[in-house]
Amino acid sequence: LFQQVIPEKMWFTRIDIKSGKVLLAGMSMSDIDISTFMDSLSKSVFLQDVVLISSAEQIQDGLTLKKFEIGCGLDPTGSQQ
């Protein structure tokens, strides 16, 4: 799912899945990409309560990037929606 909906100019630095919770951390070229990605995640029957935990600007190799963390609940059966 993550690979199918992630915007082109966004990448993950960490994915943690444990105890029914998912934590996605990464970098993006824009806030709009983060918002679009979160909207796509919210539409999945396997994820619930998608929230932006943190977002901050970071300069890397002369580029201004957005460092983010997104959290959500995992329902592997897709029965919550």
Image (tube, rainbow, N blue to C red):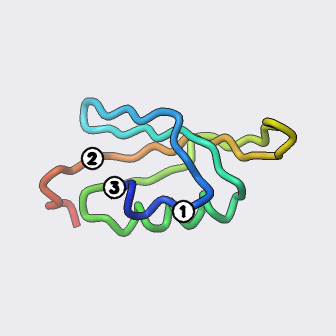
Circle 3 Cα neighbour tier, 10 Å, few/some/many (<14 / 14–19 / ≥20): many
Image marks 1 and 2: residues in contact by CB distance under 8 Å: no
Left or right placement of residue 79 versus residue 48 in this view:
left
Image marks 3 and 2: residues in contact by CB distance under 8 Å: no
Left or right placement of residue 5 versus residue 48 in this view:
right
Q: In the figure, residue 20 lies in which quadrant?
A: top left
Circle 1 Cα neighbour tier, 10 Å, few/some/many (<14 / 14–19 / ≥20): some
Would you name the residue on which mark 3 appears? 48
Residue shown at 51% from the left, 45% from the top: 70
8 or 67, which is in the foreground?
Answer: 8
Would you name the residue on which mark 2 appears? 74
Residue shown at 71% from the left, 54% from the top: 29
Residue 55: x and y in percent read 68, 43
Q: Would you place residue 58 above or below residue 36 in this image?
A: above
Q: In the figure, residue 80 lies in which quadrant?
A: bottom left
Q: In the figure, residue 17 lies in which quadrant?
A: top left
19 or 26, which is in the foreground?
Answer: 26
Q: Would you place residue 5 above or below residue 14 in this image?
A: below
Report, in whole angstroms, how far the alpha carbon at label 1 lies from the one at label 2.
Answer: 21 Å
First of labels 3, 2 by sequence position:
3
Residue 76: x and y in percent read 17, 50
Q: Nearer the viewer, mark 1 or mark 2?
A: 1
Q: Would you place residue 70 above or below residue 60 in this image?
A: below
What is the number of the mark on residue 7? 1
